[in-house]
Amino acid sequence: MRKNDIDVTPTSEAADKNFVASLQKGMDVLTCFGRQHSRLTVSEVARLTGGSPASARRSLLTLHALGYLDSDGKRFWLLPKVLLVAHAYLARSEEHTSELQS
């Protein structure tokens, strides 16, 4: 591997100095929402992610402040901004599929 290449192979998260645990927690929070769990409380997010309520609360409030979630003061739910996370992948997948079909 060259010096500037990024190694994306799975490694032990604790041993990898480049691993950002808080980003993982935020992604875990985002991905715990779904059809069966469209509106969640802090306690529910903590249970679904396996984290503490304090960590879940911090992640939820951060994602709320960034515009990825909304809240009524008790429950949180996804906002359309979460689609931006998938947009680049979906757009590239469409280009790639078009290229293959040509």
Image (cartoon, rainbow, N blue to C red):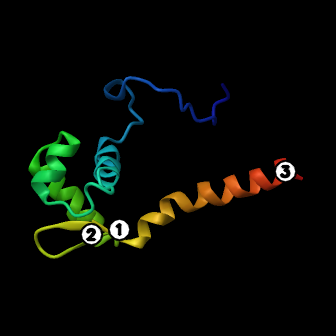
Q: Is residue 75 above or below residue 55?
A: below
Q: Which residue is mark 3?
A: 101
Q: Residue furthest front?
A: 36
Callout 2–callout 3 Cβ contact below 8 Å: no
Q: Position of residue 100 (x, y in %)?
A: 83, 47
Tell me what residue is drawn at x 35 percent, y 42 percent: 20
Which element type, helix, strand or loop, lies under badge 1?
loop
Q: Residue at x 60, y 54 (%)?
A: 89
Residues under numbered marks 2 and 1 in contact, where contact means CB atoms less than 8 Å apart: yes
Q: Amino acid at mark 3?
A: Gln
Q: Residue 47 versus residue 84: which sits nearer the camera?
A: 47
Distance (Cα) linking label 2 and label 1: 6 Å
Mark sitting on residue 64: 2
Question: What residue does disc 1 label?
Answer: 68
Residue 57 lies, in percent from the top left, at 15, 58
Farthest residue to the right: give it.
102
Dot in front, 1 or 3: 3
Relative side of 2 to 8, left or right:
right
Say few, some or many: other residues with alpha carbon within 10 Å of mark 1 (under 14 / 14 to 19 / 20 or more).
many
In space, the residues marked 1 and 3 are separated at their CA atoms by 35 Å
Q: Position of residue 79 (x, y in %)?
A: 36, 71
* Residue drawn where x is 15% and y is 48% of the image: 46
Amino acid carrying label 1: it is Tyr
Quadrant location of the N terminus in the rendered image: top right
Q: Is residue 36 above or below residue 17?
A: below
Q: Earlier along the polypeptide chain: callout 2 or callout 3?
A: 2
Give residue 19's mark. Answer: none
Write down the quadrant of residue 73 in the picture: bottom left
> Is label 2 or label 3 in front?
3
Secondary structure type for disc 3: helix
